[in-house]
Image (cartoon, coloured by chain):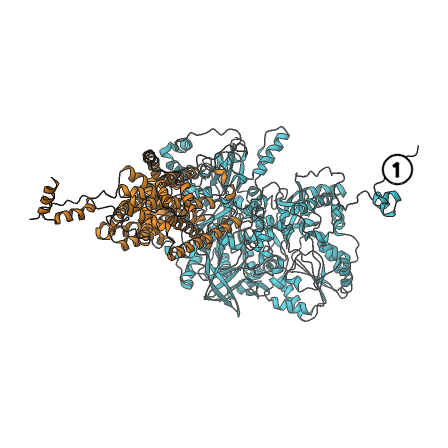
Chain colours: A cyan, B orange
Amino acid sequence: MEQNKNWQSFGELNKSEAYNKEVNNEFNEELPMVEDHSGFLQAKAPRRDFLKYLGFSTAAAAAAASCEMPIKKAIPFANKPEDIVPGIADYYATTYVQDGDVVSVIAKVRDGRPIKLEGNTLSPITAGGTSARVQAAVLDLYDTARLRFPTIAGKEATFEAVDKAIAAELKGGAVIVTSSITSPSTKAVIAQFLAKNPGSKHVTYDAVSFSGMLLANEASYGKKVIPSYHFEKAKAIVSLSADFLGTWLSPVEFAKQYATGKKIDEQAKVPAMSKHIHFETVASLTGSNADEKYLCRPSEIGAIAVALLSAVKGGEIAGVDAKLKAGIEVAAKALTANKGAALVVAGSNDKDIQIVVNAINDVIGANGTTINFGATVNYRQGIDSEFAALVDDMNAGKVNTILFHGANPVYTWPAADKVKAGLAKVKTTISFSGKLDETAAVCKFVIPDHHFLESWGDAEPVTGHISFIQPTIAPLFKTRAFQDSLLKWSGDATEYTSYVKNYWSAKLGGENGWNKTLQDGVINPATPVVSGATINSSAVASALIAVNAAKASSKIELALYQKVGIGAGQGASNPWLQELPDPVTRATWDNYIIVSPAMAKTLLNIDLNNGGQADAYEVQPPKKVVKLSVDGKSIELPVLIIPGTHPQTVGIAIGYGRAESVGKAVVGTGKNAYPLACIKNGTVNFSCADVKLEVTGATYPVALTQTHFRYDTTQGNRTEVMKEMTFAEYVKNPKEILEDREAEAKPFGGLANYEKDATIYPVYDRPGIKWGMSVDLNACNGCGACVVACNAENNVAIVGKPEVLRGHEMHWLRIDKYFSGDMENPKVVFQPLMCQHCDNAPCENVCPVAATNHSSEGLNQMTYNRCIGTRYCANNCPFKVRRFNWADYTGADSFPDNQEGEVNDVVLNMNDDLTRMVLNPDVTVRSRGVIEKCSFCVQRLQAAKLDAKKDSRPMADSDIKVACQQSCPTNAITFGNANDKHSAITKVRVDNPNRSFYVLEQLHVLPNVTYLAKVRNAGEGEEHAEKAEAKKEA
Amino acid sequence: MHLKYESQLREPLVYGNKTYAQVTEDIVRPIEAKPSRLWYIGFFIAVALLSFGAYSVYREVTYGIGQWNLNKTIGWGWDITNFVWWVGIGHAGTLISAVLLLFRQGWRTGVNRAAEAMTIFAVMCAGQFPIFHMGRVWMAFFVMPYPNSRGPLWVNFNSPLLWDVFAISTYFTVSLLFWYSGLLPDFATVRDRAFTKLRKKLYGIASFGWTGSTKHWQRHESLSLVLAGLSTPLVLSVHTIVSFDFATSVIPGWHTTIFPPYFVAGAIFSGFAMVQTLLLIVRKVFGLTDYITIGHIDLMNKVIVLTGSIVGIAYLTELFMGWYSQNKYEGYTFWYSRAYLFSPYGWSYWGMMACNVLSPQIFWSKKMRRNVFVTFFMSIIVNIGMWFERFVIIVTSLYRDYLPSSWSVYYSPSIWEIGFYLGTFGLFFTCFFLFAKYFPVIAVAEIKYVLKRSGESYKPEFDAIEAQPLESFVHDHAHAH
């Protein structure tokens, strides 16, 4: 029987060619993944779709990249890799590197996107600590200002074209200018390049160099190295204006060490505490933490060093005024009393001063104890004079080809015009900058390097300590490792990826050793070496003569400083860092001139001791603008009055006023202060004598997040907010604070019954888990790492300068800073303040719709989609930690088109599809009109509980670390289940009954955050105690 | 010899020796006449303000509360200040209509209609603020406790804001009913005089078929008494509950047990001041000086000086307690943030003191009480002062509370914040102009009760009789028999 033929189209009937093609093509619609790669960042695809396939593809890339080789193509999972589960984070050990700064980190990767960095606890150097800049680095990965392809003279080019063009230019040698390189393999690559291209040389240039110290050490010890420091071993620390907790050398490492000596063991029979004496020019983070602080001019540092040397030798103190003399006496007394456990550091970049400091350290026995030449550090290697010579060479037309990696001298060199002029004479200029920075902008070739989270590599911060870099995501753009370019141009076909692997596999016993090391992220020396170095005393004599010859100034001086977040300018384009309030000034988004209250009185006619004038200054954001001129250069900046600054010294932060091409965040933020620096004795000197200040009559608004800085107001001490005491007082009566609290609670039957008897309401049992936190104010130095960590973990919105000015910043965690005592040289305390998760929370009962309520685990929780935004809870919060979404900062609003013109460009940029990849998918992005606040990282608590549940075991203390706690370099924050007798939080509370206090305890809101009172090892206290004892005897 | 002995017991409540017909004519005529040019100008300005307010609110709803200059420390500013201010103004109406009715104060009839209307409109204005101060106003229905499909979610009965929802809505409903029930006979009067079919129909509907039967009157009287009985506690409760918004909190300057009586006194104070402001205009513009008399003004000024002095004592008590409690946070708020003239908001505290406590004291003088210009000026001053009072309570308490770290930068309102406030003026006056045009501004039926209350109106007749010679009586008498 003939089969009946059914057909659907003429094509099928006639079996046309087009029909056959169609039938044979199984997928006749294009796969979404085959879309044009270059277009997809501009594509108008909905955000969700964008994230969906970007996340999907990058997940695949990262999975393969982090385990084996980076793959260049993004393909969807045909077979899902075993260790990638959507929604479950993977963690990879890698290393934060930026211009010589090295911190070993663990990157949290969710669905192929790195979203958070945590410190790697396996590194003994930083031991899990991070800084604000480390925490913010993940945002730089998704910066929209990153260069997306190599360019020749500003036009897009392929790598092949670039390589071809440059190959011809390398004859006759090239100069490689880099910031300090800590990577052994990169150094090998550079060496190979130098060897292959005769006539080439490598110049290390650091924006803020340690030339003075390197040269001083060469003179004193014959080695041009920086030793490692051990603040934890020092019982007496003297800092000559070295901001070692904020920006000096390796702050994360030093903060950790420093806190060791500052933490008080209440259980110890003889309580001990290190003593830190600081000589301060302009109020700094380190100075704010000092036990004793003496104010000096930048030009007096040399004289102080000389006097201190004389004093520790038992000689006379000369050449300084009475106040400083007293300080030097105290310092010398402390140092000599603790020989072998004492340390002096100086922030000066002057070789002679550093030689004198070396001599002091030798006398006090620091050499070989607190200063270790057995393990030198590689953070800073640049010698300013070498770069100065290069600039001269360039201007003389002696340089044919120049390569910049990390270094950005067009912005950072004091005589930037000379660099620019020199570069104009160089035929081939190449920059490897990931962004179009000031130097890249004048270079012909720009070959963007990967972000470190996309890179392979290694770093050797301290000799013998290696920290590895492995990619956590495939390169987002057409970028290429700097080392790959050099290898290629050296005629080596090896890719840097294999180069690193081969380099280390050989040393680590093959593939397995390499994999194991990569997993750990670090290699540490088996036994730490501690050794001193022999000092060459002849260098001291000439240095003393040179220092003594320096003229003391009697005019106003300027000290340029770095901010914790912005550094030498690297942080300027990062909105998290710009919005991080500077620990010292609490200002965001700008630099300014810092003056002392005394100078404010004479210069600006503002007397901070006059209530009305102080109020007017505090409550009005526009600050007076002053024109500062020095050596024919001038700058106009607003003035902030910061107590703790020398009366005749003003300070300006460098790192601001960057080119707009490095990111939206730098637009309109501050001015470049690098040109005010000068080159003195061959090194860059970040201070100037004899500056002139002129009030211009203009004002400029500065976005401060804190207006008032005293807690001892005219109405008496608000001691319920902050408690501090001196070490002497503590030794005399450790229970003083406890007794005060007990007396306060006495009408309610003492502290033991306070919870129950100070209320007419019934008290509930709180069985099961009860989350609690403790913050040790002795360990906290106010660095701000936790604030940025909280930003990253909890998707805290950036609001931009105009909104900060209006008091709309969203930080869930802030670090309050208070002054007390003398207005000119006050004591400073930092107090991290987040939601206190009160058991008797005043915010909860006022919400009409119960959007904020109490969990059975003691959390004060916020239900965003229940909130109608009455702000009553924020008003009724005594701690003012609740934050309201005043505008559509996140783009999560249901109203379309309500951001343009209303939120700042920076905020819009944070809503860019690329930038949004940094968001933590575990945390809701809050929409406009709702209140938000610290949740104690509830997403982490839930995850930990579920993990424990899956494993059928009780939840352990170690399962949980909240973001602020984890980021803290000093472990100031303890968190855990306060109902668990064995938890760390319980231990902290039980072990420290004397210093524990709750903020505003008298309100009976019953906070769940304990603070351990600040104890300061200050002299006044000791004297006071002595006097009191003398009185008793009399 | 003149034998007449005259004892004046009370001033007349209505001047001009009106007949009943005249009363109706005087009050209803403006409704039937074409509005004056002034009315059009006033109405246009009111609608313009209302439109600007609506645009301000549109911006706030679309772009967020960030359109206002509130911040992390000052969560409430002009919004809640204006809310409390308007609610306070809304107090006089009910007091006049309900409490004075219960106390059989006849003089209330001249002013109660307008005062009640003012109450209704003021409460309407007040209501805008708590609604539109919400960050997500489209979710405002979450405050309604009704069985819903949003899971086991219910309102929080602990929250004073929720109490506000009930207090204000109850107050509004009862006031509206009271006002409207009083309007029924008057609407019927207007209906009966109507000269077009449409008017007849509309006022007919509005009067609910009032016929003026004795049964209607009897029920009307009973209803008035019942509603008066219901509203009287409301006069005390509404502002008490509004004051709980502050009194139940932990913020120094808010956490005060004195608030309920102090708020109620303040509300009556500001309410009467607003009634004065409006009635002085109305009596002039509509030529109702015979109905809203100097006697009324005098009496209301007495209430103003009494309540003004009560709030004055409350202010002083707060200051005293700020010192006596030796609570440093309270002390700081009362003695520095408020009473220290050179603190950032010191001006607002002393503005309040001058307007609310010092200036009303001139009303101890009868001459001043009965002076229309002084009264008008003072009524404005008192309203400004009472606005300052709410601003002082809200802003100076919030801006510097417990932690000095969170003390606020100087708060001044944005254009949209001011716009919202102006918009409520627009709403208020738009309503009031419409009311003045289409409603009898004086209770026609009620004023007739008190028309013959005073012997004064009979005086001319007696004078005429007395003027006649005795003979005429004799003569008449003789004729009669």
**Residue at image point 65% right, 40% down:** A89
Q: In front here: A115 or B480?
A: B480
Q: Position of residue A688 (x, y in %)?
A: 52, 65
- Where B417 sits versus B102, above or below? below
Q: Quadrant of the N terminus of chain A?
A: top right
Would you say residue A525 is visible in this rendering? Answer: no
Q: Quadrant of the C terminus of chain A?
A: top left
Q: In front here: B5 or A407?
A: B5
Q: How many marks?
A: 1
Report the amino acid beneath label 1. Lys
Q: Position of residue A851 (x, y in %)?
A: 50, 38
Would you say residue A621 is visible in this rendering? Answer: yes
Residue pushed farthest bottom?
A396
Q: Position of residue A182 (x, y in %)?
A: 66, 53
What subunit carries mark 1?
Answer: A
**Residue at image point 79% right, 45% down:** A28
Q: In front here: B469 or A337?
A: B469
Query: As drawn, is A537 to the left or to the right of A112?
Result: left
**Residue at image point 22% right, 53% down:** B367
Residue pushed farthest left?
B1
Name the secondary structure under disc 1: loop
Q: Which residue is mark 1?
A: A5
Query: As drawn, is A660 to the left or to the right of A77?
Result: left
Q: In front here: B470 or B112?
A: B470
